[in-house]
Amino acid sequence: MDKDYVYPDIIIYLRNTDFNLLVIELKCSCNKSEKDIYKLEKFTYHEGEFKYKLGLFLKIDKEGIKEMIWFKNGKEIERLQNLILWKNGQ
């Protein structure tokens, strides 16, 4: 993955250091997510060029989070589905 062409949705890092804490990719439930999953595996790989401590994939729709996947060391560590956090815009 080339650093010049990768743009995650949200990143949390400590500026002017090599400390990259969290990278987040968001998708609406109607879009495919294979590319984002691959990117999070690469972003969190401990021997890769980015070395984020954690990655988070969120697939959302109008009712809440349809899928939440956590990544660490280039691997999925936890997957949660159908987390309803709001209903009908409330």
Image (cartoon, rainbow, N blue to C red):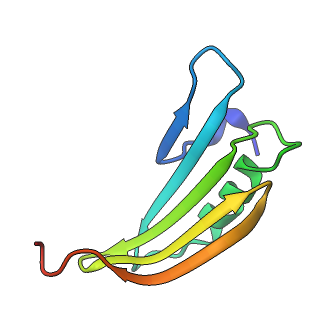
Q: Where is residue 87 in the image (x, y as percent from the top left)?
A: 17, 81
Residue furthest right in the image: 47
In the depicted structure, whether residue 8 falls above or below residue 72: above
User: Viewed as shown, does residue 78 lie left or right of 42?
Assistant: left
Figure quadrant of residue 70: bottom right
Residue 56: percent from left, percent from top: 56, 59
Q: In this view, does 55 lie to the left or right of 86?
A: right
Residue shown at 76% from the left, 52% from the top:
42
Count of picture labels:
0
Q: Residue at x 25, y 80 (%)?
A: 63
Q: Looking at the rendering, which quadrant does residue 26 occupy?
A: bottom left
Instruction: Please indicate whether residue 86 sits to the left or right of residue 68 in the image.
Output: left
Q: Would you identify the image quadrant in which residue 65 lies?
A: bottom left
Give coordinates of residue 40: x percent, y percent.
66, 56
* Residue 37: x %, y % from top left: 65, 66
Residue lying farthest top?
Answer: 16
Judged left or right of residue 83, residue 5 is: right
The C terminus appears in which quarter of the rendering? bottom left
Task: Name the residue rendered at 55%, 42% in the picture.
Answer: 7
Residue 2 in the image: above or below residue 34: above
Viewer-closest of 7 and 79: 79
Q: Residue at x 52, y 52 (%)?
A: 24
